Amino acid sequence: FFHLFLFFAVPTNFNVTPLTPTSVRASWEFNSSDSMPLEVVIRGCKLLYRLRNSSAQLSTAIVWGNSTFSKNISVLEKYTEYEFEVLTLTANGNGPSSSVLVVRTDEDVPSQAPVNLNVVSKTSTSIMVSWQPPPLESRNGIIIGFKLFHKRKGSAESENTVVVQGGTTLRKSITGLLKYTEYEVQVLAFTAVGDGPKTLIKTVRTAREFLNGKLTTMRLLVPTNHIFNLHVMSKLWRMFLSTAVPTIEEDVSPAFVICEMGTLCLLFCYATSKYPKKVIYSWTKNGIRLTDGDTFKIMNTSVVVRPHRMEDYGVYACKVSNGIHTKTYNITLGVKLNSSAVVIRRAENESHDIRFVVTVTALSTVIMLLLIPIGLLLWQRRKMSRQNTSVSENWHTHSQGRALMPLGETERAYMEIQLQGESLKHVYQTIQGKDENTEYYNVQLSKDDVVQDTGDYENAATF
């Protein structure tokens, strides 16, 4: 009897069919006989299920009675595999069970958007879009492609759609765009069921383009810090352009670098330019362009120097240019001797200053040497003049031994002597034809009339 019971109580034709991405329908049957009706053997059925390869506790759904042999299971995870089995409930407890079935729930649309969306300008009419698929637990099926949406920023036009087939293609170039125009870009992933949500909007501007041919160029000969604005209007569109004079931002080694002989030393010169972006470097020493060798290693923005002799020290010039601006930076390489830095060669402008100081010092010395004999000659001449003046003054003394009285300029020129006795009838007579009776005359003295000082003052003033 027991074996007959097992034959009739074992579920057969057990089947599980997905209904939706989150539900399935389980169905089964029993063998029946007139000698062993089902209502005598079976009280109900128990449906057991859980995630495949999971150690979690089995979930249970009970179907009472012996006339219903199916059950819908809901609240399952999308596009996920489950293990199902059914067993019989009898008056004595659990009966035999069916075999285990593995069933996957249906696909659904992705519940999350792609991640790591990146958009960059490629040319003036194209952009490059890259992304990563949605997280695995949110795909809800097999990703069979992506859709890219783009339109001009702020426009009321409909979005343009680009379909990328295949779940492994994660980048796409979009062409045929307007030049130097801002665009809004979004991406979504889709499965066989449908599209998932879009990403957040990313904005990008296509690059500028300078057409070939003859262009009218307006350029300042001397760059300034002014900013120029251009407003262009047409019947269909409006454009604002703003441009600033290109500048160079630099990061340079200190102006003085100490380097021991035979060691490696780095002279660094780095510059950036927003526009134009390309910066050209050139390194020179004493006006001669540096080349790679045992002493120098040129690395565009820097120079590695291994000085072997004293001539390797001096001033190194780094010249940077972006085609519009040019800057030169001097870096002096000094050698370390007795714990102090000694500059072997100085910058050219410092040499000019030294030569100027030396020249001025030499000229000053020559002038001083010339002034010394000139001063001595002037002093000797002044001394002789004083002696002559003293002799002239000594001549005008009183014959009776009176003290000498200095004469004024007028007194030295004329001697005013009062005539005694007669009238001035012989005033106009010359000295050669003078009358013997005349006692005094007014005569003009000259230098030849000066009498040598002999001490005989009485005879010195008589005629």
Image (cartoon, rainbow, N blue to C red):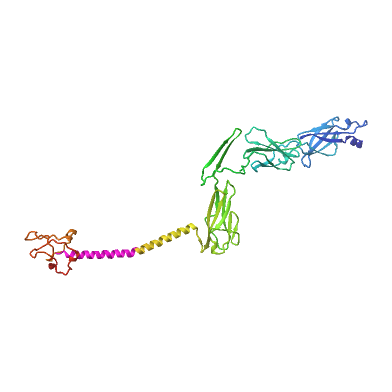
The part of the chain drawn in magenta is 371-397
Decide: is 163 above or below 268: above
Q: Residue at x 53, y 42 (%)?
A: 227
In the depicted view, which residue is nearer to us: 415 or 190?
415
Task: Give how far across and how far down residue 219 sits, in percent.
Answer: 54, 44
- Quarter of the rendering occupied by the N terminus: top right
Which residue is situated farthest in the front direction here? 433
The quadrant of the picture occupied by the C terminus is bottom left
Secondary structure of the magenta portion, mostly?
helix
Please indicate whether residue 145 sits to the left or right of residue 314 in the image: right
Q: Position of residue 147 (x, y in %)?
A: 71, 38
> In which quarter of the view is residue 107 placed?
top right
Residue extending farthest bottom: 454
Q: Is residue 195 above or below residue 364?
A: above
> Could you tell me residue 97's position as x and y percent?
85, 37
Q: Position of residue 131 (x, y in %)?
A: 69, 42
147 relative to 246 in the view: left or right: right
Give whichever of 366, 451 is nearer the camera: 451
**Is residue 251 depicted above or below 370 in this figure?**
above
Image quarter of residue 92: top right
Q: Looking at the image, which is closer to me, 216 or 42?
A: 216
Rendered view: 213 above or below 303: above
Identify the residue at image location x=66%, y=33%. Answer: 157
Residue farthest to the left, as pictured: 421
**Residue at image coords 40%, 62%:** 362
As for residue 378 lying within the magenta part, the answer is yes
Q: Quadrant of residue 404?
A: bottom left
Whether residue 296 appears in magenta in the rendering, the answer is: no
Instruction: Say left or right for 287 vs 370.
Output: right
